[in-house]
Image: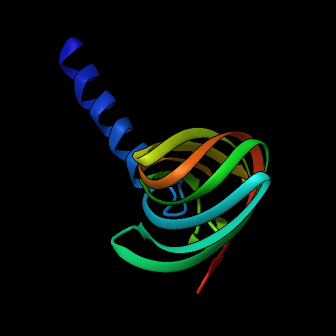
Amino acid sequence: MRCMIRPIILALVAMILAVTPCSAQATGHVQVKFVKAALVVGGGGGSGTLIYRGRHYPFIVSGFSLGMSAGASVTWLEGTASGIREVNDFAGSYTLVGGGGAWAAGVGGVSMRNERGVLLMLKGPKAGLEFAANLGGLTISLR
């Protein structure tokens, strides 16, 4: 009896793996360069690349911020995009909470989620003269 249980369990696991949909969520890798200027209210834009399921998807990004923010900076962010079912889920409007600072050089990081449930977790070096602790929005458009 015990000899029969193991093959049955293995067969069930194989069947479950075989019926897993191809549209399951996958994690992507994101690289973006963002240029920003701010004095309480800020704005900026940039471009980047989403690497998703082995393919590269260029995108453009624009955004605003409101809060404790002053200065100008260039930030190179890198991280992950999770919750993607198909590549078009990546594009859209993101709400963000982030912070960082730079005095010639520094670090920055953001966590953002869009209306389709895609979560971006990005961090990276920043150059310029800026201090920021703010809320804002960001729009990503695939090219």
Q: Residue furthest top?
A: 2
Say whether residue 115 is visible: no
In depth, the one of 127 and 54 nearer the eye is 127
Residue 56 is situated, as x and y percent measured from the top left of the image, at: 39, 78
Q: Is residue 68 above or below residue 114?
A: above
* Residue at (63% x, 72% y) in the render: 45
Q: Quadrant of residue 87?
A: bottom right
- Quadrant containing the N terminus is top left
Q: Quadrant of residue 76?
A: bottom left
Residue 100 is situated, as x and y percent measured from the top left of the image, at: 54, 39
* Residue at (17% x, 18% y) in the render: 3
Say whether residue 33 is visible: yes
* Residue at (52% x, 40% y) in the render: 101
In depth, the one of 89 and 24 nearer the eye is 89
Residue 31 is situated, as x and y percent measured from the top left of the image, at: 42, 64
Q: Is residue 71 above or below residue 133?
A: below
Q: Residue furthest bottom?
A: 143
| Colouring of the image | rainbow
- Quadrant containing the C terminus is bottom right
Q: Is residue 59 left or right of residue 44?
A: left
Q: Is residue 17 above or below residue 3?
A: below
In depth, the one of 123 and 16 nearer the eye is 123
* Residue at (77% x, 50% y) in the render: 136
